[in-house]
Amino acid sequence: MKRTSAFCRRWLPLLLLLALSASAPAQELLDKLDDALFVQSPGGFFRTDLSGRLDLEGYYHEGNPPGLIFPTDNFFFNPRLSLFLDARLGEQFYSFVQFRADRGFDVGLKQHNGDARFDEYLLRWTPWRAGELNVQVGKFATAVGNWVPRHLAWENPFITAPAPYENVTVITDQAAPASPAAMLARRNIPDRKGAWLPVVWGPSYASGASVFGRVEKFDYALEVKNASISSRPSAWDATELGWSNPTVSGRVGVRPSAAWNFGASFSRGAYLLPAAKPTLPAGTSLGDFPQITLAADANWSWRHWQVWAEIFASRFDVPNVGNADTLAYYVETKYKFTPHLFGALRWNQQFFGKIPNGLGGEAQWDRNLWRADAALGWRFTRHVQAKVQYSYSHQQGYLQQGEQMVATQVSVKF
């Protein structure tokens, strides 16, 4: 009886939203709304467009929640409303704002009171129509890698992110470990997501400035941000974290043909927060302990097939320990069976290097991980989409982070 009640409470809202939004009257209403949410000056010199998306997600996992899922409940319901405002002034100036109301940036980060915030806001100047140069300031997603351009729910064939963007390691930004042995001891406790970090924290909406563009078959991006690519969402606003230890990141890409896209990325910056200062060795500062990351990515598209792959090699300079190295990668493929139905598979792995164990030897500083993701999606109309995902993960050792997980998502776009 309890299981039936839990099912109704967690999953029924998704089914109701799906049934209501896919109906003919709802589609007509969404079409009218989509066509009406803009303001334009005579001649079109100035134009603003408002759009939005309502996502209802349900999660079931075993044991400790995996990735950047915060609730410890086996079942969890996660609603999210996203609003996007695009504005253009002539051909050279563009601004964008993304507002969200949900239970926290990551799933269930703020379970009870909810949260409302501006995740992105930026101003962009494009001096030439061809787009060889763009200058951008504000709070926006990182240029590193190839997953970020498709990380939003409508573009992502999965519900969760690849492992490099969400697998929490024992690296902390809050305090320096007292010794290598103290850091190694973290491997034997469940993920402390309020204090530990992944290689890249989702799309990493840190604040700063960037230049980017495309010249023939090549594209480039260089950015300076206030926080590292592994930093948590609470550090991304410029008002929360200053500019004393900026992070520099970039990507260079080449498109040799219509089917292929290759890229190489880098990032370097301090990952420790100001709260860690009292725990640092004497005579050192936050900037003495950077996160250095090199990455490569590839994308291939042909007819109904799409394939993406990324590999990250990241080094954290840990006070009182030394260099902690990790290698993470994933390969993801999507196949479009029909104009409405698509399926996707993803293989993720992460490996960890060794650090001194304090006893004259060395030990891996975290547990190696592999994870397989499978997803099935149905795009009912240009406004409504539903997905279901199953994930199975395993990490080295007896402690597991939710080996099995099932997630569902219904998105209504307007």
Image (cartoon, rainbow, N blue to C red):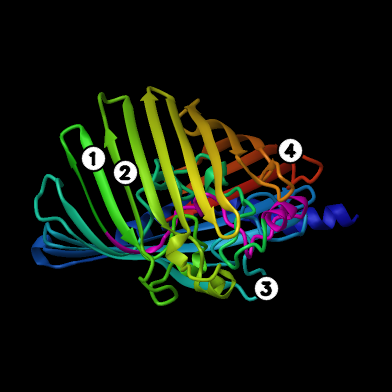
Indicate which disc, 3 or 4, sits on the residue closer to the N terminus: 3
Mark 3 surroundings within 10 Å by alpha-carbon count, few (fewer than 14), some (14 through 19), many (20 or more): few
Disc 1 + disc 2, Cβ < 8 Å: yes
Depth check, front residue: 296 or 103 = 296
Q: CA distance from mark 4 to mark 1?
A: 39 Å
Disc 4 + disc 2, Cβ < 8 Å: no
**What residue is drawn where x is 64% and y is 62%?**
177
Residue 318's image quarter? bottom right
**What residue is drawn where x is 59% and y is 38%?**
350
Indicate which disc, 2 or 3, sits on the residue closer to the N terminus: 3
Position of residue 255 measured from the top left corner of the image (x, y, whole percent) = 26, 30
Q: CA distance from mark 3 to mark 4?
A: 34 Å
Q: Is residue 167 left or right of residue 227?
A: right
Q: Is residue 318 visible?
A: yes
**What residue is drawn where x is 33% and y is 31%?**
262
Q: Main secondary structure of the magenta part?
A: loop
Q: Name the mark on residue 396.
A: 4
Amino acid found under the numbered disc labelled 4: Gln
Read off the residue under disc 2. 251
> Is the residue 240 above or below the residue 212 in the image?
below
Query: Mark 4 or mark 1: which is in front?
Result: 4
Position of residue 113 measured from the top left corner of the image (x, y, whole percent) = 63, 76
Position of residue 215 measured from the top left corner of the image (x, y, whole percent) = 15, 38
Amino acid found under the numbered disc labelled 3: His
Read off the residue under disc 3. 112
Position of residue 1 measured from the top left corner of the image (x, y, whole percent) = 91, 55
Q: CA distance from mark 3 to mark 1?
A: 43 Å
Read off the residue under disc 1. 219
Indicate which disc, 3 or 1, sits on the residue closer to the N terminus: 3
Residue extent of the magenta highlight: 180-209
Q: Is residue 154 left or right of residue 50?
A: right
